[in-house]
Amino acid sequence: MGWLPLLAGVATATGLAQSAGVDMALKWPNDLLVTVDGTERKTGGILAERAGDGVVVGIGLNVSLRAAELPAPHAGSLALAGAASTDRETLLRAVLRSLEQWYGRWRDADGDAAESGLQAAYAAGCATLDRPVRAELPGDRSVVGEAVAIDGDGRLVLATDDGLQEPVSAGDIVHLRGVEGGLT
């Protein structure tokens, strides 16, 4: 079940890229990114919560917000990224079709993210990989390292300066810029 939010991310990014005509990227684990004026911006997010034997997935997306309407300086929208379409019905249909396809592949592989192609697809679209990051973990702990992989459990694997590889299963990830550690 830990792969469901990542599956929703891949499916949403795929559907939006096809229907809106914009490049989409994923920030581990659940943010949707677009490029606005040469800068990565968060345009959406995915939340998943277990409900009994199932999982409820919610997807939030900034579709047509203008710069003055954005909720935060690092936010973006499909419109600001130059989307060919911001018609919500078109976008929703594309995302739902993509969710159906990805969920079917994952289910047919008995939830095996590698066999279904989900693990590779997530890694290919993940803007977090191959970057220096800071993982702000539960319990006021943080780890700085290079994001090197998404493992079979959907965890982000960080290579730290002391040579360890530390899998991260929960926490806020901050993309860092260069040695000085400025935020992106």
Image: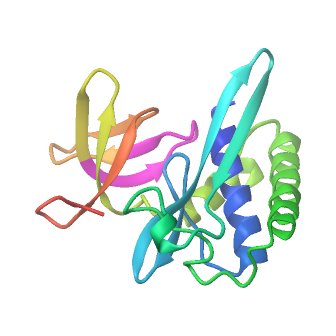
Where is the C terminus found, in terms of image quarters?
Answer: bottom left
User: Is 157 in front, or is 98?
Assistant: 98
Camera-side residue of 125 and 42: 42
Question: Magenta includes 146?
Answer: yes
Residue 99 sits above or below residue 39 on the image:
above
Identity of the residue drawn at 80% across and 60% down: 95
Q: Main secondary structure of the magenta part?
A: strand
Give percent across and percent down for residue 154.
56, 41
Point out residue 71 in the picture as x, y percentages from the top left corner. Answer: 46, 56
Q: How many marks?
A: 0
Q: In the figure, is residue 79 to the left or right of 174?
A: right
Q: Position of residue 123 (x, y in %)?
A: 55, 59
Residue 64 horizontal side relative to residue 31, left or right: right
Q: Quadrant of residue 98?
A: bottom right
Residue visible at 30% across and 37% down in the picture? 136
The residue shown at (52%, 46%) is 29
| Left or right: 180, with 4 as reference point | left
Residue 46: which quarter of the image?
top right
Quadrant that contains the N terminus: top right
Color theme of the render: rainbow
Residue at coordinates 62% horizontally, 38% vertically from top-left? 47
- For residue 112: magenta? no
Up the image or down, 69 lies above or below 84; here it is above
Magenta residue span: 145-157
Q: Residue farthest to the front?
A: 68
